Amino acid sequence: MGTETHYLLAVNELAKLHLVPAEQKLDTVFKICTMYKESITGWYKKEVRKKRLLSLLLLSAILIIMLIIGSIQTLRLPFAADATEKLQLTQLSLALLTLAVLLFIADRAFRLTAGWINYINTIMAIETRYAEFITEWIKNDATYLTQKNKHYSQAAVIAAAFINTIHLAQQQETHSWSTQLTETIKQLDSLINKQQQDKKTGFSTRPGVRTPGVRR
């Protein structure tokens, strides 16, 4: 269940307050806000654990691949017996390097490393806002004896501001993900186009290969 669903559930619960007895409304509002906060942070914490594990596995694989490439270049390639073995080792290094690059691009595209870090920042922002909400709620409770008429309306304003602020934090996190994904796709597309252009350039400059429209 995504974070948007949690928001809609909280709003729906607040819409049912007219069915709650007057003496229970404040407690109900507070419980809705607290449950909303717990459900949101719970979702993010679950995603953090999942993304962090995948990120560590992916980065570990990249590190191992780079170590293998380094060992080939320093321990095997200089001592190759003949040109054929050198060619095979070079091709193996290039293949491993390509795999490492693809894994790195996958990490960027799926926001594994950046994703769980952003999730932690979002959790911290929600926890901070919840602490502010509690402070505002306590201050409002202190006015109960002197301003009974404004007590409930002010509590409703505090609760609405809290829920909307949390929802805004989620939207900002989602926008960050969308922006980064778009940038990654553009970088990947640019890399592919560059490789294709390099291949065309290399082919056209080979001896005996004519480029259309160019006389020799």
Image (tube, rainbow, N blue to C red):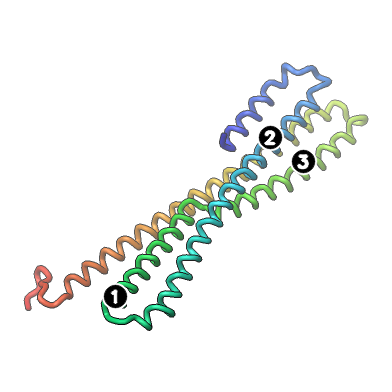
Residue 62, position in %: x, y?
48, 63
Marks 3, 2: nearer the viewer:
2
Mark 1 → mark 3, Cα distance in angstroms = 66 Å
Q: Position of residue 81 (x, y in %)?
A: 31, 82
Which picture quadrant has residue 200?
bottom left
Instruction: Answer left or right for 162 relative to 59.
Output: right
Tell me the quadrant of the picture where the C terminus can be found.
Answer: bottom left
> Which badge, 2 or 1, comes first in the chain's sequence?
2
Residue beneath the point at 7% across and 75% down = 215
Residue at 63 percent across and 28 percent down: it is: 9
> Is the residue 193 above or below the residue 110 in the image?
below
Q: Amino acid at mark 2?
A: Tyr
Dot 2 falls on a residue whose secondary structure is helix
Along the horizontal axis of the image, is 129 left or right of 182?
right
Mark on residue 36? 2
Q: Earlier in the sequence, mark 3 or mark 2?
A: 2
Per the image, label 3 sits on a secondary structure element best described as helix
Judging by the rendered image, the residue that carries numbered circle 1 is 87
Q: Residue at x 45, y 70 (%)?
A: 68
Look at the image and tell me in which quarter the N terminus lies: top right
Q: Amino acid at mark 3?
A: Phe
Marks 1/3 in contact by CB < 8 Å: the verdict is no
Name the residue carrying label 3. 133
Q: Is residue 70 above or below residue 180?
A: below
Local packing at callout 3 (Cα closer than 10 Å; few below 14, some 14-19, many 20+) is: many
Residue 157, given in percent of the width and then of the height, sits at 74, 34
The mark closer to the camera, 1 or 3, is 1
**Amino acid under disc 1:** Leu
